[in-house]
Amino acid sequence: MIIVTTDFVPGKEIKEFKGLVRGSTVQSKHIGRDITSSFKTIVGGEIKAYTEMLDDARKKALERMTAEAESLGANAIIAMRLESSTVMGAASEIIAYGTAVTVE
């Protein structure tokens, strides 16, 4: 599966538009991570536990989007975007979306 953020795939011709595809996941904070991370906010620096959690969430969202595109018979996704939002105080949604297409 080719995934690009542009509206075209360089060197390829779009043959068919399959439609919008998306994948998302909602991740919540772990109480143990929260306690450890609260100490990190005092001294500053990267909160690695959250970096890893959000990285895993992005991977899940991309995998789900790709699976949806494959189910439509697409071999590429153009104009792919990633967004995040807060669902509630302790949970965030990561969503990946784009346009599924076939290219040659």
Image (tube, rainbow, N blue to C red):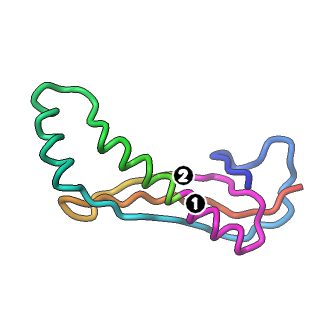
In the rendering, at what x and y percent does residue 72 appear? 72, 74
- Residue at 42% across / 64% down in the picture? 25
Q: Which residue is mark 1?
A: 63
Q: Could you say which is closer to the camera, residue 47 or residue 36?
A: 36
Between 44 and 14, which is closer to the camera in this rendering? Answer: 44
Question: For residue 17, what is the image quadrant?
Answer: bottom right
- Is residue 10 positioned above or below 7 on the image? above
Numbered range of the magenta stretch? 62-80
Q: Position of residue 89 (x, y in %)?
A: 18, 59
Distance between mark 2 and mark 1 Cα atoms: 13 Å
Which amino acid is tagged 1? Glu
Depth check, front residue: 63 or 73:
63
| Viewer-nearest of discs 2 and 1 | 1
Q: Position of residue 24 (x, y in %)?
A: 46, 64
> Quarter holding the C terminus?
bottom right
Magenta stretch: includes residue 40? no
Q: Residue at x 50, y 60 (%)?
A: 61
Which of the 4 quarters of the picture holds residue 102? Answer: bottom right
Q: What x and y, as percent, mark residue 59?
A: 51, 53
Circle 2 sits on which residue? 81
Amino acid type of disc 2? Arg
